[in-house]
Image (cartoon, rainbow, N blue to C red):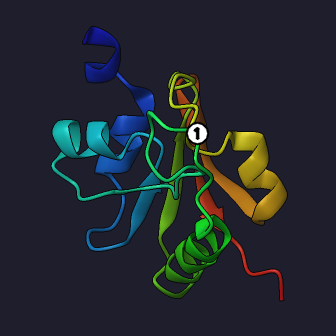
Amino acid sequence: SRVWQHSEIMEKIKGLPLGIPIFSNGADAIYILTGRSASFIPSKVVDAPSPQVNDSYLFELARMQSQLESREGVLVFFNKLAWRWYLPSEDELKEQLTLRPLAIETDGIIYKVVSKR
């Protein structure tokens, strides 16, 4: 859609260093529009149509945090993807991770994950 093609955050993503890990609630859109590989933020449920809780969620979140810290990656959160109820909200991520904004745009935010140590 036109909204995605003119996304301010997508333009910022294009300028990120190559090879860094990117996690997002819009990993598919990132790949389609920038050609950059991105992974989804861990899901709170096992399978999106089902409400079965993902028992590995906290482990997967810790693994994502470790990857982002050790490889200087980023977490990209698009604020227009509220229909992905199975992924954690921005507020939930802020509660569970120490996030520092790198770029704030009208369609989302790029965060650096900072170590709690």
Please tell me in which quadrant of the rendered image residue 86 appears: top right
Position of the N terminus by quadrant: top left
| Residue 28 % position (x, y) | 28, 42
| Residue 53 % position (x, y) | 62, 53
Between 20 and 79, the residue placed more toward the observer is: 79
Q: Residue at x 58, y 59 (%)?
A: 54
Q: Taking 31 as reference, is 68 above or below it?
A: below
Q: Taking 112 as reference, is 7 above or below it?
A: above
Q: Classify 10 Å Cα crowding around label 1: few (below 14), some (14-19), many (20 and above).
A: few
| Residue 65 % position (x, y) | 60, 74
Q: Taking 27 as reference, is 85 above or below it?
A: above
Residue at which label 1 appears: 51
Position of the C terminus by quadrant: bottom right
Q: Residue at x 20, y 36 (%)?
A: 33
- Element at badge 1? loop
* Residue 55 in the figure: left or right of residue 14: right
- Please, which residue is most extreme toward the top here? 2
Between 44 and 76, the residue placed more toward the observer is: 44
| Residue 3 % position (x, y) | 35, 13
Q: Residue at x 25, y 21 (%)?
A: 5
Q: Amino acid at mark 1?
A: Pro
* Residue 66 in the figure: left or right of residue 1: right
